[in-house]
Image: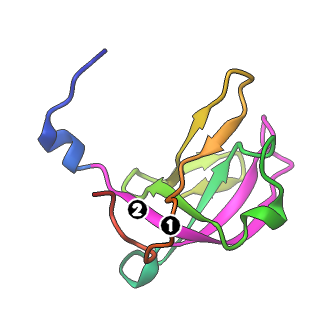
């Protein structure tokens, strides 16, 4: 396993945001949702493509807090521009389980 320095890790902006909207993404190669996430006044809203359709219905995601990397460069995914990376963990069957805070926190709060 490659090791990184503390200084390198500090550069990663892992922040909490609340999902405001979920839209279908039929053009995606693998099933995915287009998410709009509110990261508070400092960062604002960002969009992300998330391959989480196996475990999460659109209605279940709206209002859910998620953890995302907000300081990656934007990434073109087909016709969609992803502005952050919503994080999660792969299960053995390939489904992604979202990384989420277990209690509500303010949007935009950085991982401690």
Residue at the spot 49% in from the left edge and 56% down from the top edge: 67
**Near-viewer residue (77 or 71):** 71
Give the structural element (helix, strand or loop) at label 1. loop
Q: Whole-percent x and y of residue 93?
A: 75, 23
Q: Whole-percent x and y of residue 107?
A: 45, 75
User: Quarter of the image holding residue 105?
Assistant: bottom left
Q: Whole-percent x and y of residue 5?
A: 14, 33
Mark 1, Cα crowd under 10 Å, few <14 / some 14-19 / many 20+, is: few
Q: Is residue 35 magenta?
A: yes
Answer left or right for 45 relative to 30.
left
Height in image: 92 above or below 40?
A: above
- Which label sits in the foreground, 2 or 1? 1
**Near-viewer residue (49 or 81):** 49
Span highlighted in magenta in the image = 12-38
Give the labeled residue for mark 2: 15
Give the labeled residue for mark 1: 103
Q: How many marks?
A: 2
């Amino acid at each position: 396993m490659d090791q990184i320095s503390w200084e390198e890790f500090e550069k990663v902006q892992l922040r909490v945001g609340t999902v405001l909207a979920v839209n279908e993404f039929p053009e995606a190669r693998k099933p995915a949702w287009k998410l709009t996430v509110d990261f508070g006044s400092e960062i604002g809203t960002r969009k992300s493509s998330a391959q989480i359709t196996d475990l999460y219905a659109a209605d279940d995601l709206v209002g859910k807090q998620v953890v995302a990397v907000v300081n990656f460069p934007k990434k073109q995914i087909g016709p969609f521009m992803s502005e952050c990376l919503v994080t999660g963990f792969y299960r053995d069957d390939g489904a992604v389980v979202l990384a989420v805070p277990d209690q509500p926190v303010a949007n935009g709060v950085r991982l401690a």
